[in-house]
Amino acid sequence: MEAITIKRGAVYIRVSTDEQREFSPAAQLKAIEKYAVNNDIEINEGFIYRDEGISGRKAEKRPAFMKMISDARKHKGCERQFDIILVHKLDRFSRSREESIVYKSLLRRECGISVVSVTEPIAEDKFSIILEAMLEAMAEYYSLNLSDEVKKGMREKAERGGYMTSAPFGYKWQENVLVRNYDEEIYVRYIFESFLSGMSKRRIAENLNDMGILTHRGNRFEIRTIDYILKNPVYAGFTRWNPYKRQNYRQKADESTIIRKGRHEAIISEGDFERVKNMNESAVSNYKRYRDIKPVHWLGGIIRCGSCGSSLCVSLSSKSLQCTGYSHGKCSISHYIKLKTAENAVINEIGRLIKLQCKSFVFLNDGGDTEYKAEITALKKQKARLERINEAYICGIYDADYYRNKRTEEENKLESIKKNIKAINERKDGKKIYVSSFYDIIEGGIFDNEYIAHTLYSVVNKIIYCKERQCFIFYYRL
């Protein structure tokens, strides 16, 4: 009797929001399991991947899909966990021809794994290439056409004053109609009235947080939350929608933005909304006129607030650090500290941890910085180019002979750049500067802020500033 070969199969299921009824996960899995039984394919529960409510256009936005690809690549060169990937239809795998070709080629060449549609049987002959390409093209056309139709419907709804996103603070959806939420409406009025009376956005946020009021997402109020509410025309009875870019009420509307009188009730008057708008524009104009663009400090971002966990922002003008959460009205405790105090604390701690057993030295370069930086940039680009060539070969875009010649050519260019960098280093005629402590590195003026910050991050994961105890807590990388 002929032995039956049992293949191990993985299952990929995808359904977008507009396909829940026709291509439900249960219906897809039922068809796949029936196919597996009839074709001697064993399915392990641990290798059933589901992306629900997600479009098939972009792979990186499908977490289950990317995990499936990652699991397949983990076992290349050794025994595979699965030999085949089963999908209900080819458009479940991808609705982009480009991505479908890339990932199928990668799975086949690198992992020896094929993708099979259980409802679209394709024979393994030269005509199947044409059939599979046609099915993929039809899936991509359907996806693009659906996107156009959805946008057309959304534009029509926007022209009629319909609201199309989740209900903003102060409103709720009730039987597909946007209605006022009376529990939240009083706080919306408070925000507008307080701002018009001269109260700052940070103070408004702090007051709402003190009252225990949360946003729809369960977050505390910040300056940007208040700013969003003050600039949202929905509260004056209008809708705003831009078909070409993501909605952002912190930016001014452009010529493609559709603003219409809405079908919902307003919470504030149009006159109050215009007054708030004028006050905001005046404040932005003054900010742009007087703001001081400050350079980066090597401590920026690594020190965190002990109360809310936000980063402490560096102000070189006042030579201090302050919690960004407090600055935005999210944190109720000021973590102001002098910059010099923080610097000394970090220098002393790192100096205690890293004690140099012997003197080291670095060269001060008297010239050639521009040339050196240009060569370093060229080196990074060349390495990236080599990676793209390797990926193209893996995906089947290059054949073996072309890949070999192309790679040799690009590797020669890489070696040439490395030689140039070495020659620049050898030409340095600066003097030796001896370094015996971390303090010498910081205070010696040898390295720039970016280099010092990068070095610090390689050792320290984060630093917590505890205001109550007046101390710094260091978390080191293992």
Image: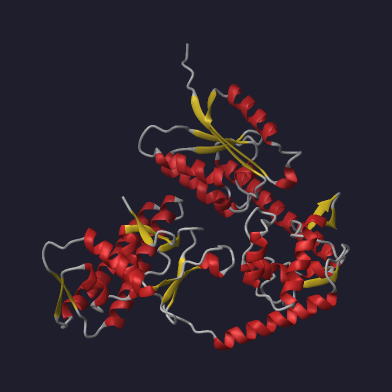
Against 164, residue 16 (above or below) is above
Q: Quadrant of residue 166?
A: bottom right
Tell me which residue sits at (68%, 58%) in the image.
211
Against 129, residue 439 (above or below) is below
Task: Please state the horizontal and vertical placement of residue 246, each as a whole percent of the image.
Answer: 67, 65
Question: Which of the pair 447/17 is nearer the observer?
Answer: 447
Question: Which of the pair 133/151 is nearer the observer?
Answer: 151
Task: Please state the horizontal and vertical placement of residue 86, each as a whole percent of the image.
Answer: 57, 34
User: Is residue 113 among the parts visible in the rendering?
Assistant: yes
Give the left or right position of residue 27, taking residue 335 as reference.
Answer: right
Total residue callouts: 0
Q: Quadrant of residue 429?
A: bottom left
Against 3, residue 36 (above or below) is below
Task: Please state the horizontal and vertical placement of residue 159, each as a whole percent of the image.
Answer: 85, 67
User: Is residue 255 among the parts visible in the rendering?
Assistant: no
Give the left or right position of residue 243, taking residue 326 as reference.
Answer: right
